[in-house]
Amino acid sequence: MSGTPAEVRTVFIVGAGPGDPRLITLAGSEALRTADVVLHDRLVATELLQLAENAELIDVGKTPGGPAVTQLDIIRMMIDRSRRGQRVVRLKGGDPFVFGRGGEEASALARAGIPVQLVPGVSSAHAAAAAFGIAVTDRRAASAVTVVTGSEGDGGAPPIDWSAVARVGGTIVVMMGWHNFDNIARRLIAVGMPADTPAAAIEQAWTSSQRALFAPLAQLRRRAADFQPPVTVVIGDVTTLSTPEVCWSIMGRRILVTRAARQATALVERLRAFNAEVIQLPTIDVHVIDNESVDAAVRRLADGQYDIVALTSVNGVEHLWAAMRRRGLDARALAGACVAAIGSQTAAALNERGVAADVVPREFTSVALADALAERGVGGKRALLARASQASSTLSERLRMSGADVDELALYDISTPQAEPDALAELQQGIDVVTLTSPSTARGLAELAGDLVDLDSLHTVCIGPVTAEAARQFGFRVVATAETHTIEGLVQAVGRYLASLGPPGDGTRKPA
């Protein structure tokens, strides 16, 4: 057995950010992924701890008024684990170096001869305000910001000169002072700050439970009496410049995405840009069909037998191209045909493959496409409709009525997948809005959730009128339909609908 001591390893003091796990820095994320042990605070998001896949997790958080691991014990653990040769991450909420004792811990480690790397985080001193559209400095209202702790004198810290704080002007941010805020407000007013100075209390910033209340300084604590820490208080005229459509309506809302998993990324990312909580419950699976019918249709296409090729979705484009490529064909196979597409995204998918759609109706529906083709004259022409096996017969019937010879080519099947239990549980907890991108997603959600929730309680925003009609038939409540039948149009419709509601937590969300 070797008596060689272990190499002393670096301790990383890392800021976790203000609540949303996406707001950690890249350096903080990298430190967690390579950690052997993580000593973390009480309010750190679970998703961040999951980054430390191979680490021992130790909760050293301090609960106000409750039991806690002492600061001295935390420092001893960091020193001990470092000397054992373990890579230690001390993970602290917000920025460890803004009222986070990060400086104290770094000094203690340095005195013990332990190498330290400091990884600052996004501080809730300004991020909490930003969660509700408040900029702590704004040239229209404040050219300075003062950040103070409400835990005055804690641990021997010097007292705060509230008179000096009030004289600085600009914005005042009070952290960790909610229980004592009545006294703080009285002291500020006593040294000359007007009692009606605009202020905001922000609870649980950058989490799905966040909320804010705006009121004059003297009334803030009373009017937000049910708020519980962590609460950040912002005092000053900047609170009157908050962007209401952001601060009241969208942040913290829960949105269900039902699109197929491999196609949902763009929609999920755009919705998360609202700082919404996005739950993914794929309600459709797409399965390729590659049989003799597909082979025969592709041969006819290559031989120039089709006058019209109509594609009704991005999936149709992708799977037609895949079938063509498997047979050694490319965009030249469509050179002699009139290529028609439903929707700008379908047209864009064609364009990516070197084909400019000849016909894209203004309304993204089968009826509109049939009418647009009929205006060009389809009598006696042969048309290929490449789409899902479950597609509506509307387009083919209308083209035949106009005299076209129509081949319907099923390139893919749509089925309802097994639902993730966690996603169904999230649905049952309550959703603010459900996004539906096709009749198939509506059908799939009805199959997966129809026995678990009242479908009429689900407020759905649909990508277009066909989807909206299908949703109503399945029993969903349609609250909005995208004006432009694209993912971007759907996102805008979601934003407009949520902007019409009150703030999350005011009773507007109806549990399923």
Image (cartoon, rainbow, N blue to C red):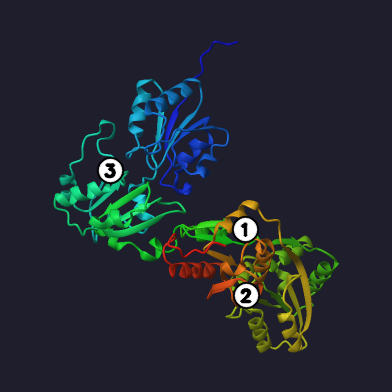
Q: Is residue 433 left or right of residue 174?
A: right
Determine whether, in the image, residue 387 is placed left or right of residue 154: right
Kindly identify which residue carries mark 2.
472
Residue at image point 57% right, 80% down: 362
- Residue visible at 28% across and 56% down in the picture: 220
Q: Amino acid at mark 3?
A: Gly
Is residue 272 among what the camera can see? yes
Name the quadrant containing residue 465: bottom right
Front residue (pair 356, 93): 93
Figure check: 90 above or below 307:
above
* Circle 1/circle 3 CB separation < 8 Å: no
- Local crowd at mark 3 within 10 Å, few (<14), some, or many (≥20)? many
Task: Using the numbered discs, state the Cα–Cα distance from disc 1 to disc 3 in whole angstroms.
Answer: 43 Å
Can you tell which quarter of the image residue 243 is in?
Answer: bottom left
Mark 1 or mark 3, whichever is nearer to me = 3
Q: Is residue 66 above or below residue 322?
A: above
Q: Which mark is residue 16?
A: none
| Residue 408 point in image, percent of width and height | 78, 75
Residue that mark 1 sits on: 281
Q: Which mark is on residue 150?
A: 3
Residue type, label 1: Leu
